[in-house]
Image (cartoon, rainbow, N blue to C red):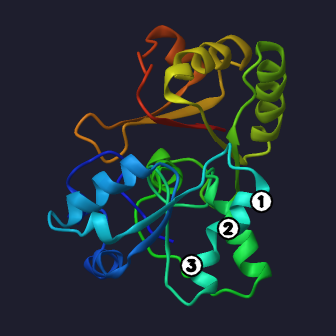
Amino acid sequence: MIPVTLGSDDYRLLIPDKVIGITRSLRVFIVENVRTARRFLRLIDTEFPIGDTLFVELNEHTPEPDIIRCLDPVIDGRDAGLMSEAGMPGIADPGARVVSLAHQKKIRVIPLSGPSSITMALMASGLNGQNFAFHGYLPVRDKERIAKIRELETKSRSGQAQIFMETPYRNQKILESLLDVCSSDRKLCIASDISLHSESIKTKTIGEWRKNIPDIKNHPSIFILQ
């Protein structure tokens, strides 16, 4: 399981040399996006033999029969790397489906260390790092999203940090919902563009955010409510 950067080209600050070495040695990759994967491999090695490398695409639209075939090279005895579009594979990522299948088939799964926007946001938030829950993506429809935010706010009152995310182009919409629904005293961390030069990680009360609403549309963000 291969970590990639969260958008930065400065991969040496985020990914250990040992992980880079293992990645360079592989010639089979199960990836969320082939173009993104090729770009990352050329980033860490300008002479990476892309033409000699097998890429198997696995995303949220991949049907179950094709997921099984993703592991064919591994079953044939080849090592394969699982790669997400950004950060760590398997977390809020379709790669979890093939990892589950690998366990069923008794294939060894090896996680490699690297950047995770979820844990990095929690680390820097100042919120509860001992008791937290990750909810992934919230519902898209307004009514369902508002109901979910109310549920998360209720859970946050126990002191448990509630972590969630959104597709970048919908960030502003979910922020508006949070500011409309949540009580003024709730704390909200907005962690945007983690590890990039434009990184912004701030924790304020909902009341404070209402006075100065940031523009986070199209900026990859993690939200933490407590």
Residues at circles 1 and 3 in contact by the CB criterion of under 8 Å: no
Q: Residue placed at 60% from the left, 54% from the top?
A: 58
**Outermost residue toward the left in this view:** 46
Answer few, some or many: residues within 10 Å of disc 3's Cα (few below 14, many 20 plus, some between 14 and 19).
Answer: some
* Residue 42 spot, x, y in % from top left: 22, 59
User: Looking at the image, which is closer to me, 49 or 135?
Assistant: 49
Q: Is disc 1 placed on a helix, strand or loop?
A: helix
Image position of 22 with respect to 127: above or below? below
Residues at circles 1 and 2 in contact by the CB criterion of under 8 Å: yes
* Residue 123 spot, x, y in % from top left: 47, 55
Q: Is residue 193 left or right of residue 83?
A: left
Label 1 to label 3: alpha-carbon separation = 15 Å
Quadrant that contains the C terminus: top right
Image position of 133 with respect to 202: above or below? below
Q: Is residue 114 left or right of residue 68?
A: left
Q: Amino acid at mark 2?
A: Arg
Q: Residue placed at 78% from the left, 35% from the top?
A: 152
Q: Amino acid at mark 3?
A: Pro
Q: Amino acid at mark 1?
A: Pro
Q: Where on the picture, by quarter, is residue 187? A: top right
Q: Is disc 3 placed on a helix, strand or loop?
A: helix
Q: Which residue is mark 2?
A: 69
Q: Residue placed at 47% from the left, 57% from the top?
A: 116
Evaluate whether residue 109 shows in this view.
Answer: no
Q: Is residue 102 left or right of residue 214?
A: right
* Residue 222 spot, x, y in % from top left: 53, 39
Q: Residue 65's mark?
A: 1
User: Looking at the image, which is closer to me, 154 or 112?
Assistant: 112
Q: Residue 7's mark?
A: none
Evaluate whether residue 53 shows in this view.
Answer: yes
**Outermost residue toward the front in this view:** 51
Q: Which residue is mark 3?
A: 73
